[in-house]
Image (cartoon, rainbow, N blue to C red):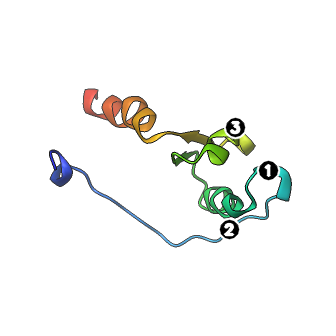
Amino acid sequence: APGTGSRRVRGEMTGSAPIPTDACEDPDDIKFLACALGGKTKIIVSGDRHLLKASGFRGIQALKPREFVDACLNRKQED
């Protein structure tokens, strides 16, 4: 795929943070909010409608993949 060799991916193990069960409509998605908080990240990239509705929870923004590319990756290329 075009551009796949031009990106670096970095991962780290992180703990999770306690999340109230009403933070997301789908209880199976709470783990993603917990990991984002534990890893001190501000963005979750997902097409999941429940996570997208939870956007803004404790400062975590949930973006669709295209929104992430448009907002974040394209901005870095301009720098």
The CA span between labels 1 and 2 is 15 Å
Q: Which mark is residue 16?
A: 2
Decide which of 49, 76 is in the foreground and name it: 49
Query: Which tag, 2 or 3, sits closer to the chain's start?
Result: 2
Which mark is nearer the camera, 3 or 1?
1
Asked whether residue 20 is in view, the answer is no
Examine the rendering and report whether any part of residue 10 can be seen: yes
Side of 6 relative to 75 (left or right): left
- Categorize mark 2 by other alpha carbons within 10 Å: few (<14), some (14-19), many (20+): some
Q: Which residue has dot 1 on it?
A: 23
Which numbered dot is residue 79? none
Q: Amino acid at mark 1?
A: Ala
- The label on residue 56 is 3
* C-alpha distance separating marks 2 and 3: 18 Å
- Residue 54, horizontal then vertical, whole percent: 70, 43
Query: What is the total number of numbered labels drawn onto the structure image?
Result: 3
